[in-house]
Amino acid sequence: MQNVCVFTGARPNFVKVAPIVRAIIKTEGIAYQLVYAGRQDDPTLEASLFDDLQMPKPDIYLGVDCENLNELTGRVMAEFENYLNHHSTDIVIVVDDLASTMAAAIVTKKRGVKLAHLVAGTRSFDINMPKEINRLVIDGLSDLLFTAGVSNNSIVTREGADMQKIYMVGNILMDSLRANHDRWTRPQCLENVSDGQYIVLTLNRKVLLADTDKLQHLLATIIDVCTGCEIIAPLRGVAREAVDKMSLPITLVPTLSYLEFGYLAAHAKGVITDSGNVAEEATFNHVPCITLNSYTEHIETVKVGTNVLVGEDCQKLHDALKLLMAGNWKHGDLPDRWDGRSAERIVQTLLDL
């Protein structure tokens, strides 16, 4: 029996591991435990999340909750080492690029346990970003690099990774989107709004939120061009506070469940975001997407999909919105291996070890 630990550090990780958990449950010869770095009462984990994702809740909560990334890293390392001391584990799967993810990766390798990184080879090429350091460390330590596409393969190869470690399994996010596409739930905020007649706005990037003048100019541009089209912003925390203080005609809505946000994003006229995952969803849904950043770790959404990068340039944003509102957006296709079978490939790889 292959004993697998699936380690998660934040809410978005669950969307990516849910298909793997479901695939393991259906497969003989492999068992898993789902470990979450945070608390059982974490407010970011809405009550419906695990039912929405059709997956069991975590088996283990490490209970780590702190803002300082270095402190968080140390505490997760201590708690995860304690977990490995008490649970027979053949391989640990870590997801994405959080400080908690890096902490679990370091402990795993120090214990001599095989380490697999899901969504390996993701880079911004900005070493000043904490997450970029996390990615480099995790990929460097990993025994298995599960990549989403050819560009990610090229990155880890250039950095010296052994080809035998690299497995191009495809985009795991698509597994969740395909599994839930017919289960989307129309949210209450659309009660008086028709499908295709609104813009979705999401914000999360700390650098942009901290520059209130720049953010206000970008939002003013959106409002100016999108006349007659409601701008719906399901924001939380710092982002919600920042936009709320500006008293702009933007509809701030309460945090949506996974299935509700899925409907909102899939039926929008367009999406404006600074999130790579949201841009991936837009490409899958063939919905126009404008990213408020000068780069993306998911370049296939630009080269093949519906995404356009405008950075923090109001003129570029203005021009892109004009095309969007006029219905003249570029045609997007689905990148290679966005077929919803990534989890199957991952589980088969684990069985073949």
Image (spheres, rainbow, N blue to C red):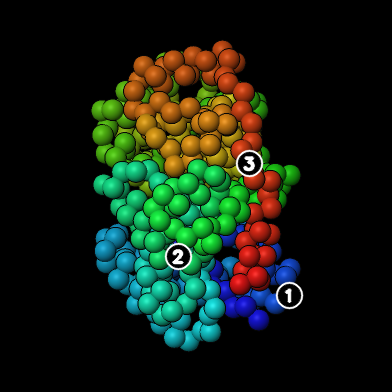
The reply to whether dot 1 and dot 3 touch (C-beta < 8 Å) is no
| Res. 209 image quadrant | top left
Nearer-the-camera pick, 96 or 180: 96
Q: Position of residue 146 (x, y in %)?
A: 54, 57
Percent position (x, y) of residue 285? 64, 35
Q: In 3D space, how far apart are the residues under numbered discs 1 and 2 (Cα atoms)? A: 25 Å
Q: Is residue 294 left or right of residue 334?
A: left
Residue situated furthest bottom in the rendering: 86
Question: What is the C-alpha distance between the residues marked 2 and 3?
Answer: 24 Å
Look at 54% across and 19% down and name the residue there. 324
Instruction: Say which quadrant the C terminus sits in.
Output: bottom right
Q: Tell me the CA gap for discs 1 and 3.
A: 29 Å
**Disc 1 residue type (three-letter):** Glu
Question: Circle 1 is placed at which residue position?
Answer: 28
State the image quarter where residue 102 is shown.
Answer: bottom left
Q: Is residue 316 visible?
A: yes
Disc 2 target residue = 142
Say what secondary structure mark 3 lies in: loop
Q: Reading the chain from its start, which is encountered first: label 1 or label 3?
A: 1
Name the residue carrying label 3. 336
What is the x, y in percent for residue 46?
53, 56
Q: Nearer the viewer, residue 234 or 348?
A: 348
| Secondary structure found at label 2 | loop
Q: Label 1 neighbourhood size at 10 Å, few (<14), some (14-19), many (20+)?
A: few
N-terminal of the two: label 1 or label 2?
A: 1
Q: Given the image, on which type of amino acid does mark 3 rest?
A: Asp
Q: Nearer the viewer, mark 1 or mark 3?
A: 3
